[in-house]
Amino acid sequence: MDPNRNQPPQDNKPEDKRPKGNLWVALIVTVVLVLLISSVVNAVINSQYTKTTYSEFLAAMENNELAEVEIRADRIVYLTKEEAAKPAAEQRACFTGLHSSGGTLALANELDEMGVKVDYQIVEDNSGIVLILYYVLMIALIFGMMRMLTRRLSGDGLMGGFGSSKAKVYMEKRTGVTFRDVAGQDEAKESLLEIIDFLHNPQKYTDIGAKLPKGVLLVGSPGTGKTLLAKAVAGEANVPFFSISGSDFVEMFVGVGASRVRDLFEQAAKVAPCIIFIDEIDAVGRSRDARFGGNTEQEQTLNQLLGEIDGFDSSKGVVCLAATNRPEILDKALLRPGRFDRRIIVDRPNLQGRLDTLKVHTRKIRLAEDVDLRKIAQATAGAVGADLANLVNEAALRAVRKGRQTVNQEDLMVSFETVIAGTEKKNSVLTDTEKRLVAYHEVGHALVAALQKHAQPVSKITIVPHTTGSLGYTMQMPEEEKYLQTSEELMIELRTLVAGRAAEQVVFGVKTTGAANDIQRATALARNMIAQYGMNDKLGLMAPASVSNPYLESQSYMDCSQETAALVDRESQALLQSCYEEAKELLLSHRPLLDEIANFLLVKETITGDEFMAYVNAEAKQLPEGTEESDGQQVEG
Ligand code: ADP
Ligand code: ZN
C-alpha cells in the first residue's frame, strides 16, 4: 500500500496519500504512447514519398532528369522533371536515405552547376541528440498532461477518489501549545487534566483496569478556544495532534466519508498515543432522525465513525476530542456511554477570563504605560477569545500604522470599536439596560428555585451571553440522579421556568423576548404532565398523547378527540398561569433579596452557587423563628 504510511508524516504538512504505484504506470503508458505517435507520424510522412536507392538518384542525375533536390544530413529528397511538370497536388517526390553526409557539399555544387534547384541544409552530427531531445520533450509533455487530467478527475472524488482519502488531515507532532496559552476556561482545563495524565501514562490506568473516555465533546460558541484547548491537551501530553473538520468527511459520493474516517483512525493508531480532533462534528454527527433531513452518505459516515470509536482500544492512548456549537442536533448514538460521553462546556469568558485572555495575547506585545487591560475587559462583555486576540492584533497594527513603538490604550479602544462593536457581535455585547433585565431574569429563576423545597440548588448564574444564544443562564446542579419525579417536583420546575418572566414583570413591568425558551420548555412540560403523565384531575389517568419513537426523542402526537385536545390546551394554560402567579408572589415577597443579588450579579457578571446561597441563607437567618423560608405564601415583614 502507500509507502508513505510507514513513516511518521512531517510536521504541519497535509499528507499526500496518492499511491506511488500509479506514477510508474503513467510513465510507461506515456512512453508507449510517444513511440506509437512517432511511428504513426513517420508512416504518414513516408507515404507521401517514393523510396528509392542512392544509385537510382545518381542515375537520374546522370540522365539530367532532376528538377529540385533537397540535401539533409540523413537523406536526399528529389523531384524529377517529369513530376515537376505535373500540377502541385499530384507531384510525388522521391527520397533516399544517407548514412553519412560526407561529400554531399561537392554533390550539391555539381547539381547546382547542372542547373538543378538545390536546397542544402546539414546540421552536422547532432541530429541524434535532437531526436532524443525531441522524444524526451514529448514524453514530458504527455506525462504532464496525463497527470493533470487524472488529478482533476480524482481530486474531487469523481474518479479513482473513492478508495483513497483526500481528507485534509493535519498532523502536528508537537503542537507547542500549552494550558498557559489558554486563558480562563478553568473548568474545561480541569476536566481535561485526567486525559493528559492518561496519555502520559496509560499503564497506570490500564493496570487497575480503568477505561478512560474515548471521546470528549467540547461545546461552545465559535472562537471560545475549543481548537486551542484540544491543541493544548496534545501539547501538555506531548503527543501528536490530528485534526480534521467534520465537513471534510461529508462528500457527495456515498462511501467516501466512511473511508476517510477509517483512514484517519488507522493513521492515528500507528502513532498512538495521540489526539484526534474533529472540528464541527455536527457536520457529520447530525441526528439521523428524519426530522433533520436524512442523508445516506452522512449516515454511513456517522456509522463508520461510531464503529471506529467503538473499535479502537483506548488503552493504546488514542483520545478523540470533538468540537461543536450545536450539541442539540447531534445523534444520540454519538453521545452514548463509551463514545462522546463527556461534555465540556467552553463558555464565553467572564470579566476575569477576558482579562486573562488579553494578558495572554499581549504577552509578546510591547505595551505603553497607560494601558489598562481591565478597562478593555470590562468593555468587552460578550466577546470571545478569538475576538480579543483579534482586538489585540488590530491594536498592534494600528500602533505600527501610527509609527509608534508601543501599543497604547487608545489603540486598544479604537480597535475594540472596530472589532467588537463594528462586527456582527454587536448584538451579543449587552447594553446596560439589557444587562439589568438579564440579571433580574436569571436571578428570578435562581431565587424561585432556591426558595422552594426540593428545588435543585443553582451552581452558577451568569449574564455573559451564552453558547445557545441565551443572554445569560442559570445552571442547576442535580444533587442526585433522579429517575422518578413527583408532580410536586415538576410544579417546582414549572415555577422556576416561568420565574424569569415573572422577575421581568415584577421589577420592570415589561415582557421581553428573552423568556421565549423558558416559556417553550414550560409549555412542553405542562403538556406532558397533563397529556402523558396523568397528573390532571379532569383527564384523570388518560394519556391522549403518545410518543412515536422514544429512542429518537421525537415529538409526541395527539391521539384523541378534538375536545380532549382542546381540554389539554386549556388545562395546560391554567397550570402555567397558576405557576406564573405563584412565582411572581414568591419574588414579590423577597424583593429586597432579589435586588441585592441582581446588583451583585451585575457587578460580577458570573456568580457561583455558593455566593448566591450565601445571600439566600443570610436572609433566611434574619427571619423570625418558626417561619419557613421556603414557604411561598409567607410574606416578609
Ligand atoms: P474555536 O475552535 O472554539 O472556534 P479557536 O480555538 O479556533 O476557537 O480560537 C481561535 C483563537 O482565539 C485562538 O487561536 C486564540 O488565539 C484565541 N482564543 C480563543 N480562546 C482563547 C483563550 N481562552 N485564551 C487565549 N486565546 C484564546
Ligand atoms: Zn430564562
Image (cartoon, rainbow, N blue to C red):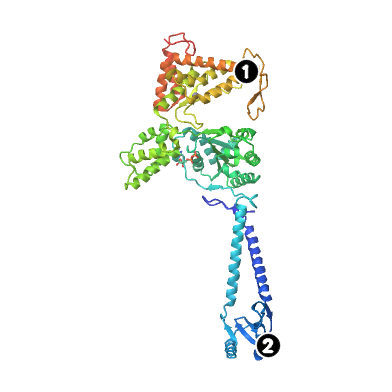
List the residue tagged with mark 1: 566
Residue 116 lies left or right of residue 390; in this view the side is right
Q: Residue at x 66, y 66 (%)?
A: 32
Where does the image place residue 424, in percent across and percent down from the top left? Answer: 45, 37
The first of marks 2 and 1 along the sequence is 2
Using the image, determine if residue 147 lies above or below residue 58.
Answer: above
Using the image, determine if residue 42 lies above or below residue 296.
Answer: below
Q: CA distance from mark 2 to mark 1?
A: 115 Å
In which quarter of the view is residue 556 placed?
Answer: top right
Q: Residue at x 34, y 36 (%)?
A: 372
Tag 2 secondary structure: helix
Tag 1 secondary structure: helix
Where does the image place residue 517, in percent across and percent down from the top left? Answer: 53, 26
**Mark 1 burial class by Cα count in 10 Å: few <14, some 14-19, many 20+:** few
List the residue tagged with mark 2: 55
Mark 2 vs mark 1: in front: 1
The amino acid at mark 1 is Ala
Closer-to-camera residue (367/555): 555
